[in-house]
Amino acid sequence: MVTLTSAENALREVYLGIVANQLNVAANPLLAQIKHSTNHIYGKEIRKAAPIGINGGIGAGDEDGALPSSSATQYASFVAELKNLYGKLEISDKALRATSNNVNSFVNLLSDEMEKLIESSNFNLGRMLFGNGSGTLATVSSTTTTGIINITGNINNFVEGMVIQKAGGTVSMRITYVDRANNRLYADKNDINSANLELGDELVVQGSQDKEITGIEGVFSNTTLYGLTKTDNRWLNPYTSSTLTYLSDSAIQNVIDTLEDTANSNINYIATTKAIRRLYQEYLGAYRRNIDVTELAGGFKTITYNGIPVVGDKFVNSNTMYFLNTDDFTMYEMCDWKWLEDESGRILKQNPNYPTYSATLVKYAELICERPAGQGKLSNVATSLTAPETSG
């Protein structure tokens, strides 16, 4: 007979390992390339020494002259707070009782709930991975009295069922439909009116403002990174270009060469939009070149540029290409994904005043880039192949 205890045992002994693997490896192609570590964690913070440049104790001299002065490698101290990542599933008492005498039905019930939890968590992890830590999804361009929010930004940051808020606000709005063709969100009109949305307001996931991991965009756009200001620490600034760039092998190689020359960085991952990835495939086809495909960790397949994967990700903003050395990134974590337990060790707990039980996955982690200057970004990539070298 299935009981709460047996359900908890299944969550702890059977599903936890599966879920952890799915969220660490299968959530996103980029996340699968990033190493994980429990080092350098002190209390609630990550404290990591980051090298600045090279050792200065080198030089040439006379046969019997003085040796070069010692000048050890300089280090800066990165300090970042671990972020609290949660995933929650819920099972009704009625559903649990209905399957109590049928193990197969219970397994199906639990498997369905776990699949929904993994799907939701994968979406949010992938989205956060390319964010800046603020939790901002998009900005409001206008609203209507019929329950529509028009937005400016990446519509792929939203999905039906997501609960959002105005940054700094308290009123929650659950998205009922995402109109991706017109950059529109649909929600309850009363909730939208209560939220008092105005032009330029930022939208965030409920309760998540300034609480998400520092994703890839944070390395490029945040003025303060891991407790250090970029103004006072210019070596933190990565390579960026907003100049209109026509997609070509030479344009890609230019960024790679620049980062190799200026930061001794070996780019091994290019993240862009799926539209730009298709455009690059078109470029290769136009020049009758072979399109090489590689398989990444987690089973993801993608095209390559000189062996470097070129990955189309829906969470990358339009007209953007990131050039990354994934060896410079580490997901520091207090522990791997765990079930949140109460004082008695229970995982499934009744929701107060409701005939439902819930279980919560938790992970305390933060993404750190140890060498921001070794990363690059093109933010104005043309959406056509009409480059000067191919025009009449």
Image (spheres, helix red, strand yellow):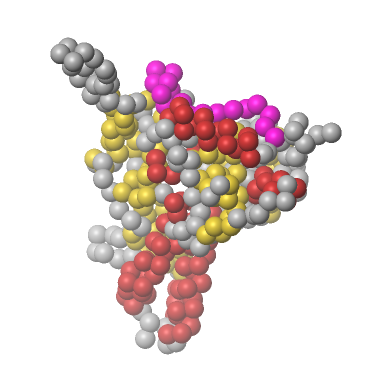
Q: Nearer the viewer, residue 210 or 288?
A: 288
Q: Nearer the viewer, residue 107 or 79?
A: 79
Q: Is residue 390 left or right of residue 4?
A: right
Which residue is at a point 40% across and 67% down the rendered structure image?
A: 18
Q: Residue furthest front?
A: 63
Q: Could you tell me residue 344's position as x and y percent? A: 24, 64
Which residue is at a point 46% across and 33% down the rendered structure image?
A: 260
Total tally of numbered discs in the picture: 0
Q: Residue furthest right?
A: 392
Q: Nearer the viewer, residue 94 or 59?
A: 59
Q: Could you tell me residue 58's position as x and y percent? A: 26, 21
Which residue is at a point 42% across and 32% down the rendered structure image?
A: 264
Magenta: main secondary structure equals: loop
Answer with the quarter of the image where residue 251 lies.
Answer: top right
Q: Is residue 325 left or right of residue 348?
A: right
Q: Nearer the viewer, residue 189 or 154?
A: 154
Quadrant the N terminus occupies? bottom left
Residue 345 visible to an observer of this rendering: yes
Quadrant the C terminus occupies? top right
Which range of residues does the magenta coloring cover? 230-246
Q: Is residue 307 left or right of residue 372?
A: right
Q: Is residue 233 magenta?
A: yes
Q: Could you tell me residue 244's position as x and y percent? A: 68, 29
Residue 202 visible to an observer of this rendering: no
Q: Could you tell me residue 223's position as x and y percent? A: 47, 25
Location of residue 340 with respect to 59 vertically, above or below: below
Which residue is at a point 43% across and 35% down the rendered structure image?
A: 265
